[in-house]
Image (tube, coloured by chain):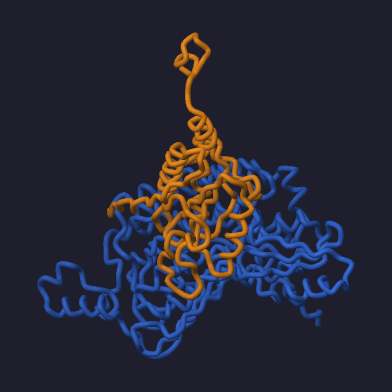
Chain colours: A blue, B orange
């Protein structure tokens, strides 16, 4: 049995230093620091330039999202999930919607399922592009950032086309989608798919064999599979250690079991492997989007929300014809639907790892408790384990490679 | 097509000191590299290839507040972060300006709760408010242009104008 891995707290580092019991230096990194990807504060214990210990201090972006959700109806709480992991709002929407749908036990139409898979995979690409751009920027490769954001803008244009918003889409609602996909959706996605594989090659040309990049990433921030599992590491960070665990394969949702794709894995668990895994994931996502686009085309038009009138409002024209539909509509917008008492947990594979949503219902139109298992938060606790004995400059690369989103860490 | 044409062959240009100073300040504004939440991603978008903020002489983001003269508060400010924001503002040398980017920084946005400061103007004086959740890069650039115009009107006596509030841009529903 290996020694248990502990995560230090800021106090454990600061107190002995203030009391003058240590020879090491304590340095504060953040919350305002360009390479902490937001407002993360790290308390570093340094021996010269070597990191002896590092303790993350979180909460600088605490927004009270989980608590605020308790005061909204189920449907209205969707907008709050967007602002949690702001690089992947659609993944958050999906996770929350799936959890409430599990509570309600509603069936989602095929067209909505496909659209959900398609858009979350596009979201995964766009999220990985921000990771790639900022990671490279932290290691002083400026041009990759400009390349990555070029394609990201194209994906954001697709989101704007379907939902009217670039980032905070709130497009996946409980029971299906907010509204149907526009007519020119499929051609726009296909246009993007036609160029994306060659653009990923372009990023790889810039970095994969770049000696400066290799120098900074190979063998840096290594973690073995056993420790990674012990620390609860998920997503690309876990897969880089060689563990082929992906919720899309292990516990498929939204029909992922019917798509053909592979799970890219690494070997050494270092920063370079995490880079390779995420690049390969983008290629796999392109493959899934291709399949989903074909399915959408074959399926043709159809409903995008559940036919359960207790959850989704009836179509507008029915309201003028049927008294019952009018009552349903009125009840849904003034009061909201009431799921039965109980709880539900759903986990999905977000771009950062396993995103879980736990919803407890007390039978009222508002959730009694909503909790999120935020992958960024849990991935961050492995930082001390990986950074010990490395230089401060390696720590910068390490934070970027973990791809934390502070909005999700603090919620 | 430059200053030579305007000045003819006289070699002399008459203007006011205020105009020259303000012209210099607007064309080389150094924003603080400071992102808080979602809006910071759109701010990055504004600086990246498609929107290219360097067209306005603003590509040089400084990570140190001592080298910056514009603070773009991009995102929600929590109660734990508020003292840090103030400290960063205090560390910036005069003259300095603040743009509150997004609804959260302007008024707390959708987060009317215990954790979020209801508008960053409770902590630092704001010059321009940009609406949106998050504002599009175009909206941020509009806010920056508005700030540039405001700086051009500034007097050397140091009297500051009241803040400008940008209206919410109309959203086209498809």
Residue A52, position as x, y percentages in the image: 83, 66
| Relative image position of residue A141 (x, y in whole percent) | 66, 43
Q: Is residue A133 left or right of residue A172?
A: right
Which quadrant of the figure has residue A81? bottom left
**Taking B79 as reference, is A268 above or below it?**
above
Regarding residue A255, the answer to whether it shows in the image is no
Quadrant the N terminus of chain A occupies: bottom right
Instruction: Identify the residue shown where x is 34% and y is 55%.
Output: A164
Q: State how many labels appear.
A: 0
Residue situated furthest top in the rendering: B9
Relative height, residue A282 to residue A243 (above, below): above
Residue A380 horizontal/vertical position (percent) = 66, 68
Q: Is residue B158 in view?
A: yes
Locate residue A99 relative to residue A209 in the image: left or right. Answer: left
Query: Please, is residue A222 above or below residue A311 in the view?
Result: above
Toward the viewer: A19 or A48? Answer: A19
Which residue sits at x=65%, y=48%? Answer: B66
x%, y% of residue A12?
77, 76
- Residue farthest front in this picture: B157
């Amino acid at each position: 049995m290996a020694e248990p891995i502990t995560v230090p707290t800021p106090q454990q580092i600061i107190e002995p230093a203030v009391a003058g019991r240590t020879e090491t230096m304590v340095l504060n990194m953040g919350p305002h620091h360009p390479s902490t990807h937001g407002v993360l504060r790290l308390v570093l214990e340094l021996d010269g330039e070597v990191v002896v210990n590092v303790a993350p201090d979180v909460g600088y972006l605490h927004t009270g999202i989980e608590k605020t959700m308790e005061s909204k109806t189920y449907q209205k709480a969707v907008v709050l999930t967007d602002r949690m992991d702001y690089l992947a709002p659609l993944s958050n929407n999906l996770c929350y919607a799936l959890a409430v749908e599990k509570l309600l036990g509603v069936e989602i139409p095929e067209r909505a399922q496909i659209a959900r898979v398609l858009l979350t995979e596009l979201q995964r690409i766009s999220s990985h592009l921000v990771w790639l751009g900022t990671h490279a920027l932290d290691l002083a490769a400026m041009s990759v950032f400009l390349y990555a954001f070029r394609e990201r803008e194209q994906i954001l244009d697709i989101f704007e086309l379907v939902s009217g918003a670039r980032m905070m889409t709130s497009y996946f609602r409980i029971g299906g989608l907010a509204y149907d996909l526009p007519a020119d959706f499929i051609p726009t996605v296909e246009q993007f798919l036609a160029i994306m594989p060659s653009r990923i090659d372009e990023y790889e040309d810039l970095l994969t064999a770049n000696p400066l990049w290799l120098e900074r990433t190979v063998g840096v921030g290594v973690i073995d599979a056993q420790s990674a599992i012990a620390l609860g590491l998920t997503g690309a960070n876990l897969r880089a250690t060689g563990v082929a665990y992906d919720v899309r394969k292990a516990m498929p949702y939204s029909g992922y079991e019917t798509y053909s794709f592979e799970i890219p894995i690494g070997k050494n668990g270092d920063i370079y492997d995490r880079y390779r895994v995420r690049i390969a994931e983008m290629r796999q996502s392109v493959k899934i989007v291709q399949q989903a686009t074909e399915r959408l085309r074959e399926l043709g038009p159809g409903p995008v929300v559940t036919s359960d009138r207790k959850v989704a409002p009836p179509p507008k024209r029915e309201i003028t014809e049927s008294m019952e539909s009018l009552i349903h509509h009125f009840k849904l917008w003034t009061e909201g639907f009431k799921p039965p008492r109980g709880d539900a947990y759903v986990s999905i594979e977000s771009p950062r790892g396993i995103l879980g949503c736990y919803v407890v219902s007390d039978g009222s139109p508002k959730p009694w408790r909503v909790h999120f298992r935020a992958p960024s938060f849990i991935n961050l606790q492995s930082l001390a384990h990986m950074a010990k004995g490395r230089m401060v400059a390696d720590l910068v690369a390490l934070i970027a490679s973990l791809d934390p989103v502070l909005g999700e860490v603090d919620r | 097509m430059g200053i030579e044409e305007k000045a003819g062959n006289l070699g002399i240009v008459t203007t006011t000191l205020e105009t020259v100073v303000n012209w210099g300040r607007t064309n080389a504004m150094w924003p603080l590299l400071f992102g808080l939440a979602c809006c910071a991603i759109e701010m990055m978008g504004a600086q990246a290839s498609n929107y290219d903020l360097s067209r306005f002489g603003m590509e040089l983001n400084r990570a140190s507040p001592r080298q910056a003269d514009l603070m773009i508060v991009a995102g929600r400010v929590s109660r734990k972060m508020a003292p840090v924001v103030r400290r960063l503002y205090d560390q910036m040398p005069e003259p300095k300006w603040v743009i509150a980017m997004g609804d959260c920084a302007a008024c707390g946005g959708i987060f009317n709760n215990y954790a979020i400061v209801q508008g960053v103007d409770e902590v630092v004086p704001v010059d321009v408010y940009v609406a949106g959740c998050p504002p599009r890069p175009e909206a941020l650039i509009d806010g920056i242009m508005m700030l540039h115009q405001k700086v051009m009107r500034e007097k050397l006596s140091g009297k500051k104008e009241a803040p400008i509030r940008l209206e919410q841009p109309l959203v086209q529903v498809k």
